[in-house]
Image: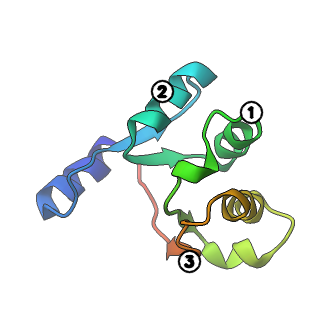
Amino acid sequence: MPALNEQIDSLKICRYRIKQITNENTTKRTALYVSGGIFAVSNTIMVMDLLQRAVSPSIITNLVVNDAERVDSVLNDESWITTMIRKENKVFFGKIKTSYFSIES
């Protein structure tokens, strides 16, 4: 994630750092979510955090989804995540910001 944050810093377009959510314990992830900001989260972790209420859908304002055309399918994580957020969050933009990018290691 450092390379991505360096690119964002050079563009001077965002005052928030992207926080990568990995396999921290649920309590730590909840604290990160509550602190606000921009997060990079895997589908698996987001589904788990929504089910365990580690993150409230009401605080999520937007999503960036890779390969967003897959969200139309009912049988994938992205579709389930957006449905759960939309059910409980009336301020959710309703549009999914789409993007495709590859982070090289």
Residue 24, quarter of the rendered image: top right
Horizontal and vertical percent for residue 103?
Answer: 43, 55
State the residue at coordinates (53%, 29%): 29
Residue 66, quarter of the rendered image: bottom right
1 or 2: tag closer to the N-terminus: 2
Asked if 3 appears above or below 95 in the picture, the reply is above
Q: Which residue type carries mark 2?
A: Ala
Circle 1 residues within 10 Å: few <14, some 14–19, many ≥20: few
Q: Which residue is mark 1?
A: 52
State the residue at coordinates (59%, 27%): 23
User: Are dots 1 and 2 in contact, CB under 8 Å?
Assistant: no
Horizontal and vertical percent for residue 28?
Answer: 52, 22
Q: Which residue is mark 3?
A: 95
Q: CA distance from mark 3 to mark 2?
A: 26 Å
Q: CA distance from mark 3 to mark 1?
A: 25 Å
Question: Which secondary structure, mark 2?
Answer: helix
Q: CA distance from mark 1 to mark 2?
A: 14 Å
Question: Which secondary structure, mark 1?
Answer: loop
Depth check: 80 or 10 in front?
80
Circle 2 residues within 10 Å: few <14, some 14–19, many ≥20: few
Q: Residue 31 bears which disc, if any?
A: 2
Q: Which residue type carries mark 3?
A: Lys
State the residue at coordinates (31%, 52%): 4
Q: Which residue type carries mark 1?
A: Gln
Q: Say whether residue 25 is visible.
A: no
Asked if 54 appears above or below 14 in the picture, the reply is above
The mark tally for this picture is 3
User: Are dots 3 and 1 in contact, CB under 8 Å?
Assistant: no
